[in-house]
Image (cartoon, rainbow, N blue to C red):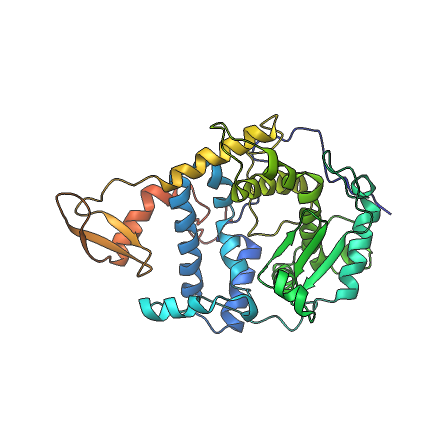
Amino acid sequence: MSMNIVESNVKAARGTLVPKSSINDPHIRKIINYIHKNANVPVKQIEDEIQEEVDRLSRQAQKSPLLFNTMLANAVERALFNMFKPKELVDPNELLASVISGKKPPVRVQSPATSPKFNSVDFYALVRRVKIENQSLFPLRNFHDKKPIVSPRIILIPSDDPDTQKRFGSIDTAAATPNGEFIFNVHFMQQCLDYAHIAGLKSKFKKYKSNGGQFPDEYAMLEFLILHEFYHYTHADFHYHKVLKDDEGKKAKGKIINWVGDFRTNYDLLKAGHVPIPVGLYNEEVNYDRQKEYAEMYNLVKNELKKLKEAEPPPKVGDVIYSKKSGGYHVVTAVSADGKKVKARPATPAEIQGYRKPKIAKKLPMNPKPAAGKTAP
């Protein structure tokens, strides 16, 4: 039995761990073709939705490269992963918003018939295997809580128990509590299995079938999720939330603690070679390879998040802007003297392309299709 080392003191060089995806990657084209055939959606519509996610993260990265450049590098895969979101996790307002704006509803594909279906027996077996292979983590402990957790409580939702469902039913991915409860949404885990199956993702660890083990390779993404939640406890994120003061002397905020914890944890899991979940928070600039203290990471993230709230300068006539309300691109035709009122018309495809070229195409993974006979970058 191989022992997985989930934390490494060896410093990783920049650029070696970032999940990256390009529109022309073979597994990306494979997923696009699958969605095209099985959801009966034109390839262009799928690529347009991918580009919307690339553009969204690009706008965020222009304000805060430190927070978003790492996630931007995998924007293509993030967008495709969301297309596998099951109906149970889709916000009803999502469809309503598309109807109001006149846009096509987001692309969604049903669970592939060939992918492994989530099985609680297999999941609990995987949890036990993870515990055996990572004995340094168990019993779960951190530097603050004196009493270790020998048997963490695993909770699957939706639950038939009304009290459990009332407490945790709103969790649409996974979560951990200070009391050692670890909650996993079954529908989200099925989404992970479906995506991993169509992408053909494989794990390097011996417990998976491609290496002669007992678990389907798709479950490697669930192993990432399990360890991620255990880390919230062992890394003492809950303790920092209680006691940490920022560089302004203010009490730590839960959202920022979660970003820091996720950045640190996901980076460690990537270093150990685990199969990442595309929509996770990843950052190769905020982790213990770059900073020495948790507080330093917290203040970095806090000050970067402030940049996202800073007011942008008013647009000028001729600027191409993105409207969240309509979900589309427009060209500014008039701006009031105070810059608060803007008139605009829908942008043409050529104007949108021109807007994207200088700001996005050169540094984002939406690469142009290669010429005949050439290999995609």
User: Nearest the camera: 5 or 246?
Assistant: 246
214 or 261, nearer to the observer: 261
Q: Is residue 366 above or below residue 190?
A: above
In this rendering, the answer to whether 349 lies above or below 102 is: above
Q: Is residue 239 left or right of residue 65?
A: right
Residue 176 place in picture, x, y as percent: 66, 51
Outermost residue on the left side: it is 337
Q: Is residue 135 visible?
A: yes
How many labels sit on residues?
0
- Residue drawn 52% across and 53% down? 78
User: How far across and how far down the image is residue 290, in percent?
Assistant: 58, 28
Side of 97 where 38 appears, left or right: right
Residue 208 appears in which quarter of the rendering? bottom right
Q: Closest to the observer: 42 or 280?
A: 280
The extreme top residue here reads 292
Residue 79 image offset from top left, x and y in percent: 49, 56
At x 30% / y 40%, what residue is drawn?
Answer: 311
- In this rendering, position of residue 280 left or right of residue 60: right
Instruction: Note whether 281 is above or below 347 in the view shown.
Output: above
Q: Which residue is pictured at 64% across the width and 41% down the height? A: 238
Q: Quadrant of residue 134?
A: top right
One can see residue 206 in this view:
no
